[in-house]
Image: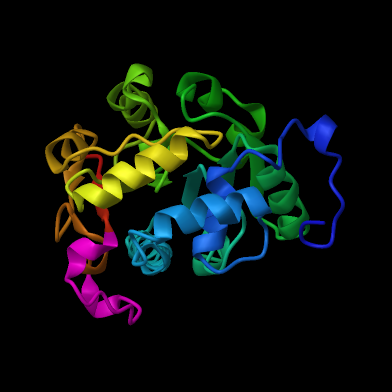
């Protein structure tokens, strides 16, 4: 059972014995939507990186701060790609008057999202793959929900590190950017290889056995993902450093780099 619903696993096309990146993240956040294989994989990483639980919460906090910033700047439409399992502080909760499209390719995520968002008004759930941005941008449900001739906030939080170099993440972001109107924003967070070597090694090893491998990148490479966007203050920083005066109180005893993740918000001129 997940969320009180018995899922038809064969028809949904997932294997509960293979760790899922969405369910791993849910486990770090303290959720309940995971299986023994997910918990075992997560605990292997937490052995060397117990701060990952705080990092997951800090990533959700960053998403909320970024969405509030964009809403205050006049952005009324959001495209959340790789949304993951529903958790506290979803985009439509932070910006309740905005139009929001949630995108994921995980069938379990889609079941949860559609059940949660039924009757939520200006929200749409779309099945799509970030690695195929051109196809996603042609999705009729997405185009009915969003006006791409007006500014959109595109959220890529903790998702691009599941895109392999062979899939060319820079080209993916460029395809999304070129479809956006001036005044649109990119909200991005990305696990980094600049974190502790032991963490990088263990996390990469564990995710090789998951449904999507992990590709951590350094600051320079992550910065290149913002090409064509102007980074807003304070630039590309560790999660707790992005507008910290508005951040939730999440204690990183060994400094902000313990969040293991760099983040930023860029504006298309």
Q: Between 225 and 138, which is closer to the camera in this rendering?
A: 225
Report whether 113 appears left or right of 188.
right
How many numbered callouts? 0
Q: Is residue 185 visible?
A: no
Residue in the picture at 20% in, 53% down = 196
Position of the C terminus by quadrant:
top left
The spot of residue 101 in percent (x, y) is 57, 45
The spot of residue 127 in percent (x, y) is 65, 34
Q: Is residue 176 visible?
A: yes
Report whether 71 appears left or right of 95.
left
Position of the N terminus by quadrant:
bottom right
User: Quick check: is 254 in the magenta stretch?
Assistant: yes
Residue in the picture at 29% in, 51% down = 199
Report whether 145 appears left or right of 116.
left
Residue in the picture at 72% in, 52% down = 112
The spot of residue 212 in percent (x, y) is 50, 33
What range is drawn magenta here? Answer: 243-259
The spot of residue 62 in percent (x, y) is 35, 63
Q: How is the image coloured?
A: rainbow
User: Quick check: is 41 in the magenta stretch?
Assistant: no
Q: Is residue 62 above or below residue 203?
A: below
Report whether 111 appears left or right of 109.
right
Residue in the picture at 59% in, 50% down = 38
Q: Tell which residue pokes out farthest to the bottom in this image.
A: 249
Q: Between 79 and 76, which is closer to the camera in this rendering?
A: 79
């Amino acid at each position: 059972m997940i969320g009180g619903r018995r899922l038809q696993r064969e028809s949904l096309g997932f294997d509960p014995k293979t760790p899922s990146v969405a369910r791993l993240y849910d486990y770090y956040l303290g959720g309940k939507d995971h299986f023994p294989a997910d918990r075992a994989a997560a605990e292997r990483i937490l052995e060397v990186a117990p701060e990952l639980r705080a990092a997951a919460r800090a990533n959700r906090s960053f998403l909320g701060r970024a969405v509030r910033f964009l809403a205050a700047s006049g952005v009324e439409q959001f495209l959340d790609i790789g949304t993951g399992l529903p958790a506290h502080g979803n985009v439509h909760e932070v910006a309740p008057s905005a139009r929001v499209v949630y995108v994921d390719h995980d069938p379990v995520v889609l079941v949860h999202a559609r059940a949660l968002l039924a009757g939520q008004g200006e929200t749409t759930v779309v099945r799509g793959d970030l690695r195929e941005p051109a196809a996603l941008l042609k999705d009729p449900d997405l185009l009915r929900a969003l006006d791409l001739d007006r500014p959109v906030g595109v959220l890529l939080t903790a998702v691009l590190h599941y895109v392999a170099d062979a899939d060319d993440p820079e080209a993916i972001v460029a395809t999304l950017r070129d479809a956006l109107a001036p005044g649109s924003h990119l909200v991005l967070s990305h696990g980094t290889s600049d974190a502790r070597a032991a963490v990088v090694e263990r996390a990469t090893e564990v995710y090789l056995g998951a449904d999507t491998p992990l590709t951590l990148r350094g600051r320079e490479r992550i910065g290149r993902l913002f090409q064509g966007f102007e980074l807003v203050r304070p630039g590309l920083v560790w999660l707790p450093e992005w507008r910290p005066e508005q951040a939730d109180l999440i204690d990183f005893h060994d400094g902000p780099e313990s969040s293991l993740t760099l983040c930023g918000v860029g504006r298309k001129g």
